[in-house]
């Protein structure tokens, strides 16, 4: 019977040692997971900060882009207006050239008629 108590005591000691070993392993794993979790939280916080900065930058760029698009539209309207003015100026100049040529021709005809009357 003493042998069984001794065996039972040895079995309990072995089990206790296994539990202590398992507990240490679980404690080590818990520490590693805690470290990984802290690193992951730090990385997440850093990424969230970067994302916020990128969102602000993107909003600024979109605003700048909208302003540039408006300027481009304004310049396109100015170009269209200037092209219209140029077309009108060319038309007026052509009319002026035609009128001047007609007037010069009429003056030549008038001089010729005067010259012929004088003959």
Image (cartoon, helix red, strand yellow):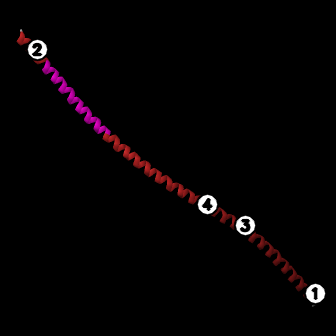
Element type at marker 1? Answer: helix
Pair 3/1: label in front? 3
How far apart marks 1 and 2 lie (CA) works out to 157 Å
Where is residue 22 shown, x and y percent of the image? 80, 75
Residue carrying label 1: 3
Give the side of residue 81 with respect to residue 49, left or right: left
- Residue drawn at x 63%, y 61% as measured from the top left: 46
Mark 3: few, some, or many residues within 10 Å (few <14, many ≥20)?
few
What label sits on residue 112 in the rendered view? 2
- Measured along the vertical axis of the image, is residue 24 above or below residue 10? above
- Measured along the vertical axis of the image, is residue 79 above or below residue 117? below
Residue carrying label 4: 47
Pair 2/4: label in front? 2
How many discs appear?
4
Where is residue 89 shown, x and y percent of the image? 26, 34
Mark 2 / mark 4, whichever is N-terminal: 4
- Residue drawn at x 50%, y 54% as measured from the top left: 60
> 36 or 65, which is in the foreground?
65
Element type at marker 4? Answer: helix
Mark 3 / mark 1, whichever is N-terminal: 1
Element type at marker 3? Answer: helix
Pair 3/2: label in front? 2
Mark 1 / mark 4, whichever is N-terminal: 1
Residue extent of the magenta highlight: 82-107
Mark 3 / mark 4, whichever is N-terminal: 3
Mark 1: few, some, or many residues within 10 Å (few <14, many ≥20)?
few
User: Which image quadrant for residue 113?
Assistant: top left
Image marks 3 and 2: residues in contact by CB distance under 8 Å: no
């Amino acid at each position: 019977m003493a042998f069984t108590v001794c065996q039972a005591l040895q079995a309990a000691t072995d089990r206790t040692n296994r539990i202590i070993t398992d507990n240490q392993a679980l404690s080590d794993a818990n520490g590693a997971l805690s470290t990984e979790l802290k690193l992951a939280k730090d990385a997440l916080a850093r990424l969230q900060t970067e994302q916020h900065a990128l969102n602000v930058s993107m909003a600024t760029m979109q605003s700048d882009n909208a302003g540039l698009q408006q300027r481009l539209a304004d310049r396109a309207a100015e170009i269209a207006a200037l092209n219209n003015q140029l077309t009108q100026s060319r038309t007026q100049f052509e009319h002026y050239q035609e009128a001047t040529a007609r007037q010069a021709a009429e003056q030549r005809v008038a001089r010729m008629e005067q010259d012929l009357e004088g003959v």
